[in-house]
Image (cartoon, coloured by chain):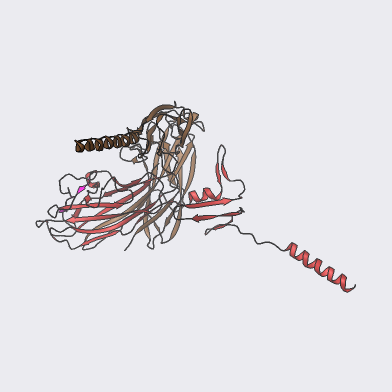
Chain colours: A brown, B red
């Protein structure tokens, strides 16, 4: 029973390049299985497909001014090779930018694809195969830190009715990149009550690609979640990004209401008066 | 030299030997086919501590840990950074040969295999699937069409329940880590995206956090009617693992 068991490292590279330069990136691919495997390489462009970090290959167009090739003496991009069982191979990817390239981002995946061996089985049969990819995020710019602009958007605080007990308060939202260059989220959510900080969440440093939005997440163990119980009252929420991301901070607020204690008191009061009424009726 | 002086010199020599005796130091080494690196870091204590709920990795007393940035380089110094980078992107498909054997009419035949993935710090993953074409007879043009499930609604991007023996076709279910958004439970099936019909690979397993050895059981199901043309039916299915950017 053959299997596919590959490791690819690194899983993502991020470079800021000037026009007319060549960089070299080494990848290490490991065949962890006990069978030889026939492999091929390819580089495909992509665009983000949603706000979670997934990608779309079908609508992406390759930048003609970025040229990929393999620097291995015995291998070219798109050429079949065999990796013996439990062995590693270094693949040297060359990335060259032409002089007339537009200053903007380009996104690609370096794929290692299993080449299927033809089966001549006389059984009803599906042949599975594997493919593993490493993302390449390229910024072509004249400067090391190109200027970026961002917006905090679609902020949501739920549940809508916030009680002092039971359900925790969750914060979600997106960071929109309004520039031509990707950046990493660097910011925090601060929750205050009566000017006293109740909780501060650090946002995870996920990539936000050019002119796309990305859902933010928090590095806290429970994500962007404020645990109950909470004192009733008015809470302020401030979301701030690092000044280098050129974003306005976002302010909102919410109320925590003592709904469950009130319901409990109403229930007790109702029971008290109900029992009293029944007792009065039974005496009459 | 009297006996007392002899004893004094003997003790002095012994003390000198004891003082100059080399101490054994423990340091990390790394080996590959081409290199041997003696890791130049000495610390008081380090390692991995486990309890029922937590795993803690630590290094105490280490020199100059941290991230150092310059115009052209970033150096991440310290064992804790090495721990972060220890999990590379890896992808395992447990069985590539999905042999359905002899197909019985009106009774679904199933085979299974397992997908397992690990991703590095800072990345979740997507696993996509696509078939080269529907199950097609060797040397002929007959196909076992992709299932539309019991309510005639499922496609390559929509799952639905398939339990009825009078529902025919070929489909699959994924059950395990990262599959609940695509298959609510193991009675839900969907079609493979069909490359020959210009359909695009669809995500079948996805998580937004770094994972280690997360897996899902893939169940492939064929059910054929009595009027299915005889023959041997085959296709190939490609699973694609990529990190979240």
Residue B230 location in percent, x, y?
13, 59
Residue B231 visible within the image: yes
Q: Residue B1, relative to residue B198: is it above or below?
A: below
Q: Which residues are magenta?
A: B141-163
Considering every residue shown, the one lying at the far right of the view is: B1
Residue A98 visible within the image: no
Residue B80 location in percent, x, y?
53, 49
> Is B211 in front, or is A236?
A236
- Left or right: A267 in relation to A31: left
Image quadrant where one finds the N terminus of chain B: bottom right
Give the mark count. Answer: 0
Image quarter of residue B29: bottom right
- Left or right: B192 in relation to A246: left
Considering every residue shown, the one lying at the far front of the view is: A284
Image quarter of residue B96: bottom left
Residue B216 location in percent, x, y?
32, 53
Considering every residue shown, the one lying at the far left of the view is: B227
Magenta run includes residue B157: yes
Specify the principal SS of the magenta part: loop
> Is A66 in front, or is A46?
A46
Magenta run includes residue B103: no
Q: Residue A46, relative to residue B230: is it above or below?
A: above
Q: Residue A143, relative to residue B75: is it above or below?
A: above
Image quadrant where one finds the C terminus of chain B: top left
What's the residue at 81%, 66% (across, down)? Answer: B12
- Left or right: B219 in relation to A65: left
Residue A93 location in percent, x, y?
45, 46
């Amino acid at each position: 029973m053959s299997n596919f068991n590959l490791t690819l490292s690194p899983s993502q590279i991020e470079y800021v390049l000037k026009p007319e330069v060549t960089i070299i990136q080494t990848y290490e691919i490991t065949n962890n299985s006990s069978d030889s495997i026939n492999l091929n390489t390819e580089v495909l462009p992509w665009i983000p497909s949603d706000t979670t970090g997934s990608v779309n290959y079908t609508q992406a167009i390759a930048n003609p001014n970025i040229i990929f090739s393999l620097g291995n003496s015995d291998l070219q991009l798109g050429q079949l090779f065999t990796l013996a069982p439990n062995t590693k191979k270094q693949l040297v990817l060359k990335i060259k930018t032409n002089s007339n390239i537009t200053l903007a981002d380009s996104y690609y995946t370096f794929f290692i694809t299993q080449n299927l061996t033809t089966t001549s089985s006389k059984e009803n049969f599906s042949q599975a195969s594997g493919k593993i990819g490493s993302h390449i995020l390229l910024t072509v710019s004249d400067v090391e830190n190109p200027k970026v602009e961002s917006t905090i958007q679609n902020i949501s605080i739920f549940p809508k009715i916030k009680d002092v007990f039971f359900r925790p308060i969750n914060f979600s939202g997106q960071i929109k990149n309004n520039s031509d260059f990707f950046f990493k989220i660097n910011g925090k959510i601060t929750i205050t009550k009566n000017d006293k900080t109740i909780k501060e969440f650090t946002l995870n440093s996920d990539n936000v690609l050019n002119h796309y939005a990305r859902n933010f997440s928090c590095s806290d163990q429970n994500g962007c979640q404020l645990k109950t119980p909470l004192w009733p009252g008015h809470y302020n929420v401030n979301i701030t990004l690092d000044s280098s991301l050129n974003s306005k901070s976002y302010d909102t607020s919410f109320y925590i209401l003592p709904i469950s204690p009130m319901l409990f008191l109403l229930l007790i009061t109702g029971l008290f008066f109900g029992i009293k009424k029944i007792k009065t009726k039974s005496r009459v | 030299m009297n006996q007392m002086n002899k004893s004094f010199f003997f003790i002095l020599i012994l003390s000198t030997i004891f003082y100059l005796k080399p101490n054994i130091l423990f340091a990390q080494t790394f080996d590959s086919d081409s290199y041997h690196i003696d890791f130049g870091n000495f610390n008081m204590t380090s390692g991995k501590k486990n309890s029922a709920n937590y795993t803690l990795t630590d290094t105490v007393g280490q020199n100059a840990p941290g991230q150092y940035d310059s115009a052209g380089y970033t150096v991440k110094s310290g064992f804790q950074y090495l721990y972060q980078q220890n999990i590379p992107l890896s992808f395992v498909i447990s069985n590539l040969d999905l042999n359905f054997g002899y197909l019985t009419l009106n009774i679904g035949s199933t085979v299974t295999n397992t997908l397992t993935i690990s991703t590095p710090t800072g990345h979740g993953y997507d696993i996509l699937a696509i078939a080269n074409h529907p199950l097609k007879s060797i040397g002929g043009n007959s196909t076992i069409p992709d299932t539309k499930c019991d309510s005639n609604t499922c496609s390559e991007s929509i799952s639905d329940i398939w339990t009825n023996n009078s529902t025919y076709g070929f489909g699959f279910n994924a059950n395990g880590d990262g599959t609940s958004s695509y298959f609510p439970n193991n009675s839900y099936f969907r079609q493979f995206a069909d490359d020959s019909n210009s359909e695009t690979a669809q995500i079948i397993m996805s998580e937004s956090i770094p994972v280690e050895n997360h897996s899902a059981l893939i169940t492939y199901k064929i059910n054929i009617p009595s009027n299915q043309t005889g023959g041997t039916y085959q296709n190939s299915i490609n699973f694609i693992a990529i990190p979240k950017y």
